[in-house]
Image: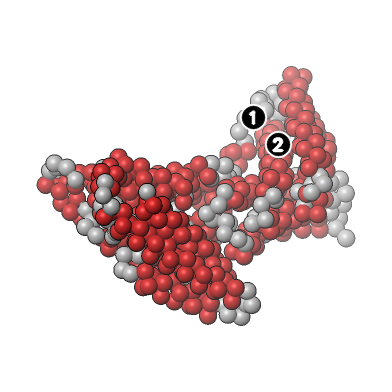
Amino acid sequence: MQYAITVLAGLGLIYAGLRLLAYSYRRLASRRLDAVVRSGIGGTLTPWLAGLAVGAVARNAGTITLTAGGLLSTEGARPSRVLALLCGAAVGTAFLVFLVPIAPYTMGIGVLTVAAILFLLDIRHADQAQFAGEAVLATIILFIGLVTARFGGEALAAAPGASDWLAILATPPAALLIGAVLGGLTVSAWHAAILVIAVVEPGVLAPAAAALALAGALAGSTLAELVLLRRLGGTVRQLVNAQIVPRLAAAVVAVAGLLASVGDATALAEAVGSLLHPTDAFGLAVLYLALQVLTGVCLWIWIGPRLTALVRHRPDGDEALAAPRYLFDADAVDPETALDLIRREQDRIVPHLALVVESALPENRGTATGRAEATTRGIAALGQAIDRFATDLIDRSHERRPVARATRAMIRTNALMELNAALSEFAVLAHVAATSPAIAPIVDAMSESLHALVTAVGEALGDDRSGDDLALARALTDDRSGILRRLREKVGRSDDLIETEDLGFVYQMTGVLERCVWLLRHLVDDEAATPGVPARPSA
C-alpha cells in the first residue's frame, strides 16, 4: 500500500511540475506566441513551423484557436494556413513526451534550455526573471516527481501480491479507463501521456496497456474540453467544434488498431498492430507522436471544407438576421408605418443598451449587479413590446406596398433584438467572470471596448446625429480586428487560462463580443443607407 501511495505522490508532483512549467513557458513567451501565430497565418512564416513552435511551447491549441478565430472573423486569414497551423500545433505537443523515457536529468536539461531561450528572446522585460525562476522551480518539482514515481513503481512491481493487481490494470478495459480518467482530469492529452509513460519503465503498467491508455487519454481530454467549452460563441466556437470530431476519430482509430494487435487478427491488423504496439517507454513516445500526426491528418480532412464555408458564409450574416422571427407578412405590411414604429422603439432601446454595458464596466461592476439585472429584465420587456407591435401592425395593415422596405424593417427589428440579447448576455457574463482574478483584465478590456462602441453607435442613431457621428461609429466598428488583437494581447499577459475553467468564459465572451460588434456595424450601415440621414449636416 505504501508503495502505491509513493507512486501516486510521484505522479502528483509530476503533474504539479508540468502545470507550473506550462504556466512559466507561456508567460515567458506570451509576447512572442501571438506574433508567431499571426506570422504563420499571415504568410511571413511557414504555418506548419509556426504551429509546431507554439504547440511545443504553449502545448495547447486553445491559444491558437482564439487567435485564429479572431483573424478569420476579420477575413484577413486564409483557411488553408489556419488549418496547417492547427495541425502543426497538434504535433508540437509531443516535445516533452519524448524527453521522459530517456532520463529525468535529460528532461530537466531540455526544459531549462527552452526556458533560457525564451528568457533571452524577451530579456528586456523585468518580469521575465520571475517566470524563468518559476521554470527552474517547475523543473525541480518535475525531476523529484519522476524519481519518486520510478522508485515507488519499482518497489510496487517487486512487492509480493502486487502482480494480481497489476494484471488487472493491464487489461484493455482498465487501461482505456485509466487513460480516459487521466485525460479528463488533466484536460490535456500530453499531460496524461507523460503520467502514463512515467509508470511504464518501473513496471507498474505494461507497454501494451499503456498504449491503450494513451488512446483513452486522447479521447478523455477531448470530451473534457467539449464539456468545458460547451458555451462558446462566434467564430471561435466553429473552430473548436470542428476539432472535436477529428480528435475523437483519431482516438477511435488508434484504439481499434491496438485492440487488433493484442488478439487473433488478420495479417493486415497484425501489420497495423506491429506499428502501434510499443515494447518500451520510448516506443510509447513514438506512439503518442503518431496519434498526434493522425489527429492532424483528421483535422486536415475534416476541417478544410468547413473552414472555407466559415469564411464564405458567416453564421452571423444577413441570412441569420433575416430569419422570420416576428412573422412579418412582407406583402401586407405598410413599410412607412413599420419603419416609424421601429425607429420609435429604437429610441427607447438604445439608452437601455448603454446602461447594460455600463453596468459591466470595472468601476461599476461591484455595485451595479442589481441594476444590470433590472435593466436586462427591462430589455426583455421591450423585446416583448416589439413583438406585440409587429404583430398588431400586420393585423391592422391592409395596404400592399413594395416589399423592400418592409423586409428592411424586419431585419432592423431582428438586429435590435439580437443586440438586446447579446448585450444582456455579455453583462451577466461580465459579472460572473469578474470573480476570477485570472480573467478580470480580459473582462475589463472587453467591457470598456464594448461600452465605447455602444456609446458611439447610440449617438449615431439619435435624432441629432451628424455625419461625423456616423463616420466615427463606422470607424470604431470597422476596428474589429484591432479589438480582437488587443484582447489577444490581454490573454497573452494573463494567468494560465487555457487549462482552467476560466477558458469557457473567455471563449464565450469573445464570441458574444464579436457578435455585438457585427450587429452594431449592421445598424450603423443600415442607418447610413436610410434616405434623409444624416438629419443635420456635420459641423
Could you tell me the amino acid type at mark 2? Met
Question: What number is the disc on residue 419?
Answer: none
Taking the spot 78% from the left edge, 30% from the top edge, the residue there is 381
Query: Farthest residue toward the left?
Result: 267
Query: In the structure shown, which secondary structural element does the residue marked by tag 2 occupy?
Result: helix
Q: Position of residue 186 (x, y in %)?
A: 46, 51
Query: In the structure shown, which secondary structural element does the residue marked by tag 1 occupy?
Result: loop
Above-or-below relation of 324 to 265 = above
Viewer-proximal residue, 152 or 298?
152
Residues at marks 1 and 2, CA–CA distance in whole angstroms: 10 Å
The quarter of the picture where residue 86 lies is bottom left
Q: Position of residue 194 (x, y in %)?
A: 38, 58
Residue to which mark 1 is pinned: 325
The quarter of the picture where residue 356 lies is top right
Q: Is residue 466 visible?
A: yes
Could you tell me the amino acid type at mark 1? Arg
Q: Position of residue 22 (x, y in %)?
A: 50, 63
Q: Are marks 1 and 2 in contact (CB under 8 Å)?
A: yes
Whichever of callouts 1 and 2 sits on the residue coming sooner in the sequence is 1
